[in-house]
Amino acid sequence: MAQSLQPLEIPRLIFRKTHKSHVTERDICPHYFQSYESLTTDGFQPRKDLAPWPYEIPIDWASNPYSDRNWQFQLNGWRKVEPMLEKYFQKDDNAYLLEAIAVALDWQSFNASGAENPFAWHDMATGMRAARLALFLDRIFSKRVTVPDGATEALLECASEHIVRLRDETFISKGNHGVFQVFGLSLLASVALGPMANRACQAYCAKMFRKIMKQGYTDEGVHKEHSPSYHLFTTDRILQFNPRRVADAATADLLARAEKLGPWFVRPDHYVSPLGDSSGKGRRLTGAVKLAHLASGRSFAVADLAKSGYAIVRSDPNAEHQPSMLTVTGSWYSNAHKHNDELSFTLFEHGEPVFIDSGKYGYQYDDKRAYIVSAAAHNTVSFRDPAIEVGRPSRKGSFLHLITQEDDGFVVGGEVERGAYSHSRRLLYCPEKHLHIVDTVQGSEGAEYATSLHFSHELEPVLLPDGFEVRLRCGKLIRGTVEGADLQLARGETGPMLGWESVDYLKLVPTSTVRAVFSDRKVAWRIDLN
């Protein structure tokens, strides 16, 4: 096991009058969500779904007025100072910078007092604060701002504790939080440490960044946190932080692969494929893309990332009309943003979402979150009783096979072994024409299972004796039939939860779910899309 490096003490005498300011707005990677006017008039509001929180200094940094873990993280990550910094960078007015420094000093005073604060040393929040401390000290040492007596020493004390904690390898997250920790420490060390100590710290940051990239991305460049949104978020943040600070050539190459893959996860309507904890929009796929040609002469863009846990078939991204996109997921690397969605898929067809994923919801550990991450909330196999846990796969890695072509379509398949049962799936997808799904399950004798199809909340499927039909918003009628199963339709049920879609943070709306319930080993869907 690798040994943690010894903490570094800050040699105070290196802060000289000759310090040259170098910290930029890009270096601290701010997130300008709330305006300064809103902050000062209404209060702190890091997310639109929560009401503003009026505050006065001194602040109770252990506050949790909304019983919301993410809000507590945002508070202790000093999101409050970012509207002030936005004004500072816009106007080059030190009054806004001093206001931000006052907030940092208040946080330091609160935590130095010994007051209990469960999010004081949250890993990502610590990295975010380190970058802001670097900005504050940079401006002080370069004589670009004058602070009250005692403020510099208090900030140095705060910086010292941040450096000591971030120099502990066991504290560095190997997920996306670690990115903020490593870049925050690198920036703070470049300001606060003397030449020798800074060089040692930069070498440590480069080593930790290599570990984060190796653990966080597959060799193909796919982020391992089971979520297209976090692939985009983590990759974009690294690029915004200026990765040349800590990245060697091999790590830079891996990052380039990750950047190139990002738009593949964005649908033609600009929305990110809602797998895992995903939401929001992203940059669409454009530019030169190698196309796969079917026997009929039609051509489609294919990202065969089966080794990493994704398979994507979509319309030519350079065509004016892009009606189709199938995204299949099937991997388990850790519990980070992981849903029980192995071998699940989403389908965007005729220019709109048809079969959707449950979405992100949020990070409150409640019954709604439990449903959203369950197998019953995804387009895959679960138990008939959605309250019965399916369990984690028996191994880590990808469960998908490489994409092949057959019958003028694309075949995506895979197998996953669970403690309760094994599941094999085969999808034959012919864009705009049909989707065939064959599920084979082996488990305990007498057990009952369900293979589910979740529709966009704007659609209202109707059950038929042997399947369903649904009218899309564009007017197209899609019809599905199933063999070897009984059908159920659920929408917005609560006992137990079935048929819900996350449309915003901590916001669910009813959606229709068609479930094919079976006890035999095999069930097959044939869905006509044309």
Image (cartoon, grey):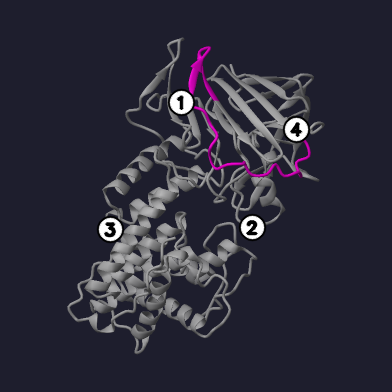
Instruction: Specify start and end residues of the magenta stretch as a single range.
Output: 384-412
Is residue 411 rendered magenta in the image? yes
Characterize the local packing of mark 2: few (<14), some (14-19) or many (20 or more) Cα atoms within 10 angstroms: some
Is residue 318 rendered magenta in the image? no
Viewer-nearest residue: 479 or 438: 438
Mark 2 or 1 closer to N-term? 1
Disc ID at residue 364: 2
Label 2: element kind: loop
Nearer mark to the viewer, of 2 and 3: 3
Disc ID at residue 345: none
Mark 1 or 4 closer to N-term? 1
Disc ID at residue 449: 4
Nearer mark to the viewer, of 2 and 1: 2
Quarter holding the C terminus is top right
Nearer mark to the viewer, of 1 and 4: 4
**Farthest residue toward the left?**
18
